[in-house]
Amino acid sequence: MHFQFTVAPPTPALPIPVAGHATGSDTSVELLRQMLDVQREHLGFLQAQAANADAGTRWKNFLTRWNGEFPGIGRQCKEVLPAVERAWLGLIHELTSKLREQPADELENEFALAEFLDRYATKIGQLGLMISQLGPLADAAG
């Protein structure tokens, strides 16, 4: 996975006012100018951070970068995502139905717990991971 980071160049240090060379109002005006410059700099940093944090744009750039080698992969993700979601929800439904029908202490038995985890945990975890990977690609494909 590739991500783009934007780093702003260092800014020069703010000059330290020398006592005795400026009147009170000149010092106040200069201080206000410096504060305004710092606020503008912070705004620039926040705008760059917001642009880098947009996950949809990152995924779109990712698909664009690999479009030559994997044409249409975003559209394909969008097509198969409902089937993976349906399989995942089917397992979740089966798991919750089984747990509701069992006595509360059924999973306290080591063998029953191991069997339960073998039956559901890996499949649900892997399907959930697939959804978390296919979803953003499908959304980025539009």
Image (cartoon, rainbow, N blue to C red):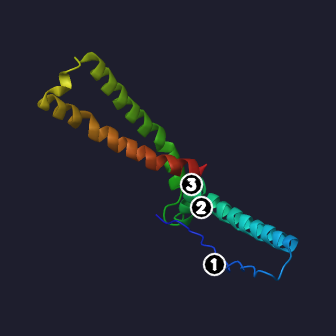
Tell which of 35 and 104 is nearer to you: 35
Q: Residue at x 53, y 61 (%)?
A: 62
Question: Where is residue 14 shown, x and y percent of the image?
Answer: 70, 77
| Vertical side of 87 occupied by 32: above or below | below
| Vertical side of 18 occupied by 76: above or below | above
The image quadrant that residue 28 belongs to is bottom right
Tell which of 133 and 34 is nearer to you: 34
Tell which of 6 and 36 is nearer to you: 36
Q: How many marks?
A: 3
User: What amino acid is labelled 2 in the image?
Assistant: Asn
Q: Residue at x 82, y 73 (%)?
A: 27
Q: Nearer the viewer, mark 1 or mark 2?
A: 1
Secondary structure at numbered mark 2: helix
Q: CA distance from mark 1 to mark 2?
A: 19 Å
Question: Where is residue 140 shown, x and y percent of the image?
Answer: 58, 52
Name which of mark 1 and mark 3 comes first in the sequence: 1
Name which of mark 1 and mark 2 comes first in the sequence: 1
User: What amino acid is labelled 1 in the image?
Assistant: Pro
Q: Which residue is mark 2?
A: 52
The image quadrant that residue 104 belongs to is top left
Judge from the rendering whether residue 97 lies leftward or rightward of residue 79; answer left or right: left
Q: Which residue is mark 1?
A: 10
Question: Where is residue 127 shown, x and y percent of the image?
Answer: 37, 42
Q: Are marks 2 and 3 in contact (CB under 8 Å)?
A: no
Q: Which residue is mark 3?
A: 55
Q: CA distance from mark 1 to mark 3?
A: 27 Å
User: What amino acid is labelled 3 in the image?
Assistant: Ala
- The single residue placed furthest to the front in the displayed view is 20
Secondary structure at numbered mark 3: helix
